[in-house]
Image: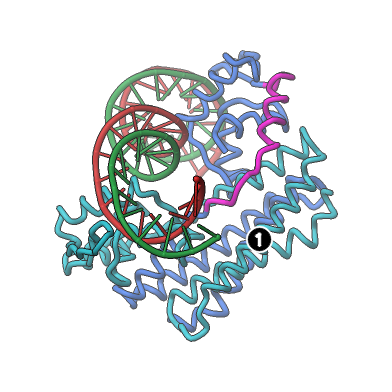
Chain colours: A cyan, B blue, C red, D green
Amino acid sequence: MEIKTLCLGILALGDATGYEIKKMVGEGSFSFFSEASYGSIYPALTKLTDLGLINCRVEKQESRPEKKIYSLTPKGREALEESLTKDPGPDKNRSEFLAALLFAEAVSPGRVTDLLDDRIRSHRDKIAELKAISDPDDSGATAFVIEYGIAVQEAALGFLTSNKHRLA
Amino acid sequence: MEIKTLCLGILALGDATGYEIKKMVGEGSFSFFSEASYGSIYPALTKLTDLGLINCRVEKQESRPEKKIYSLTPKGREALEESLTKDPGPDKNRSEFLAALLFAEAVSPGRVTDLLDDRIRSHRDKIAELKAISDPDDSGATAFVIEYGIAVQEAALGFLTSNKHRLA
DNA sequence: AATTACATGTAATCCGTTACATGATTGA
DNA sequence: TCAATCATGTAACGGATTACATGTAATT
């Protein structure tokens, strides 16, 4: 998914500023399946505005820079619907950890245990983080996606804890 | 992990040609956590050779182009060890599927069921594929990594099948 | 006193994919 | 006969990150 579609989709869930979009993809419920920097978000927002897919209202604040709050236009909604008809394709999982594990066994066997222990810790952290943002009252897709994330993280954690003895 | 380290690591597991490396990252046991094209592999191999981290022996074949078989040098092994001391960092999971799911609920609710069903099917395929390349006799990191992949895919599949009624 | 959060944006740079270029052999 | 497999490589292009640029206010 290109960055423009990501912005369009986030704005379909509610109006937001570039700054807020960045927070969502960096920390919120989007954080475990997407990522984006200011250097890609702001230009995308400008481009989408030029295309008439979103529009922008400026809110003045005292002693703070102005906020540019973007919202989806009907045309933008159509464009989003159109792009959602396409097959999303398989996930792209780039795991430095798995690669490191595979290679470490060959060249630095002593490193394997550390790699495993660090990873177990970060799975626990990620699960705690996801549980903190999950809302049991929400029955919609957001909660579904977060719980999906928790399920996957827990499976990975479970596999590592019960199999680490094989490599360590 | 940059492409150069990936090549170094693969060569630490055994000599290979650029063509073979591409097959490994595209179909083999690396396929679910990395990816690379010829356009990045061949230049990386040339660069690594210039740096003295790998070397190349040419094998002539009748009625086929020559093979360039690369192998890791001691210097290359050191460089790999060095890069493995660094924290691999969290995985980068870009999931078009999860994003599409989240957005579809907002703009095309009818699309949700299809998205879910397609995804369930592709998890089943992926699991079958991983099981086909997994070797129960191998007790090393390669088998570990493949089984890790299976565990994660099965958790995702399980979550989707038992929770799809919530969205569909 | 220093860091984090708020808030937006641009330019340089990196990294990688896609498409192009070439060519023989084998199986459907 | 047509597609796929084997086998290597380059050039154009695209997309995103990083670093840069600016400035206030609250928190530690």
Image point (74%, 38%), residue name? A104
Frontmost residue, C10 versus A140? C10
Residue A67 inside the magenta-drawn segment: no
Image point (37%, 54%), residue name? A1
* Residue situated furthest bottom in the rendering: A137
Disc 1 crowd, CA 10 A, few/some/many (<14, 14-19, 20+): many
Which residue is denoted by mark 1 in the rendering?
A123
Q: Which residues are magenta?
A: B71-92
Image point (68%, 41%), residue name? A100
Image: B128 above or below C22: below
Image: B114 above or below A121: below
Q: Amino acid at mark 1?
A: His
* Residue A120 picture quarter: bottom right
Residue C7 located left or right of residue B8: left
Please give the chain letter of the residue carrying mark 1.
A
Residue B47 located left or right of residue D12: right
Residue A160 located left or right of residue D25: right
* Residue A131 picture quarter: bottom right
Please provide percent x and percent y for residue A27.
48, 61
Report whether residue A5 is seen: no
Please provide percent x and percent y for residue A77.
22, 67
Image: B38 above or below A94: above
Frontmost residue, B72 versus B56? B72
Image point (84%, 52%), residue name? A166
